[in-house]
């Protein structure tokens, strides 16, 4: 419960957070994503989740939900792959870590940015939901999004 409260306080559980989140819908699935400078994280949160706090590091959060369930969309575990590309075309793969808090599932990754103010990264996000229907014989199609954001100090 404490984990959920801490993540909610930071807006890291994207389905719940409404601030500056991005979303892409594909079929029955919703792909939520958001990034923020890691220096904005409280030190306690960074330590708890093994995140680096630095003016040259950003945190990306990703989550997947499935529509069509009774009530609100439900969180779904997924295999998430992300790359971040800077304005000079340098690409870095992000190691995404799964964070489970109650029924919520989110993925956290970090990317490096340069020393300048207004650094822009383009994130290429692919998430393959793990809740496929075994009777259908095929897993759900991967969800894809491209997300561009400038980071200011």
Image (cartoon, rainbow, N blue to C red):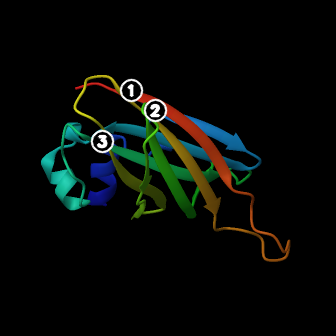
The furthest residue to the left? 43
Give the residue at x 32% y 50%: 7
Residue 13 at least partly seen = no
Sequence-wise, which precedes: disc 1 or disc 3? 3
Give the residue at x 73% y 68%: 132
As measured in the structure, the alpha-carbon distance from the residue carrying label 1 to the one carrying label 3 is: 19 Å
Give the residue at x 21% y 60%: 48
The residue that mark 2 highlights is 18
Sequence-wise, which precedes: disc 2 or disc 1? 2
- Depth check, mark 2 against mark 1: the one in front is 1
Q: Residues within 10 Å of mark 1 (few under 14, many from 20)?
A: some
The residue that mark 3 highlights is 10
Q: Is residue 17 left or right of residue 140?
A: left
Picture quadrant of residue 93: bottom left
Residue nearer the viewer, 80 or 63: 80
Discs 2, 3 touching: Cβ within 8 Å: no
- Looking at the image, residue 137 lies above or below residue 145: below
- Looking at the image, residue 64 lies above or below residue 23: below
**Disc 1 element:** strand
Discs 2, 1 touching: Cβ within 8 Å: no
**Residue 103, percent from left and from top:** 48, 62
The residue that mark 1 highlights is 150
């Amino acid at each position: 419960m404490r984990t959920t409260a801490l993540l909610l306080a930071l807006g890291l559980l994207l389905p719940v957070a409404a601030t500056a989140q991005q979303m892409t819908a594909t079929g029955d699935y919703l792909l939520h994503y958001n990034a923020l400078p890691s220096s904005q994280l409280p030190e306690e949160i960074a330590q708890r989740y093994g995140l680096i706090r630095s003016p040259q590091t950003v945190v990306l959060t990703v989550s997947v939900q499935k529509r069509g369930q009774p009530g609100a969309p439900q969180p779904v575990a997924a295999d998430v792959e992300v790359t971040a590309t800077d304005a000079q075309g340098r690409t870095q793969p992000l190691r995404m870590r799964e964070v489970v808090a109650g029924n919520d599932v989110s993925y956290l990754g970090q990317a490096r940015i340069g020393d300048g103010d207004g650094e822009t990264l383009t994130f290429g996000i692919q998430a393959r939901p793990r809740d496929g229907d075994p009777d259908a014989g095929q897993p759900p199609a991967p969800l894809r999004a491209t997300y561009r954001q400038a980071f200011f100090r």
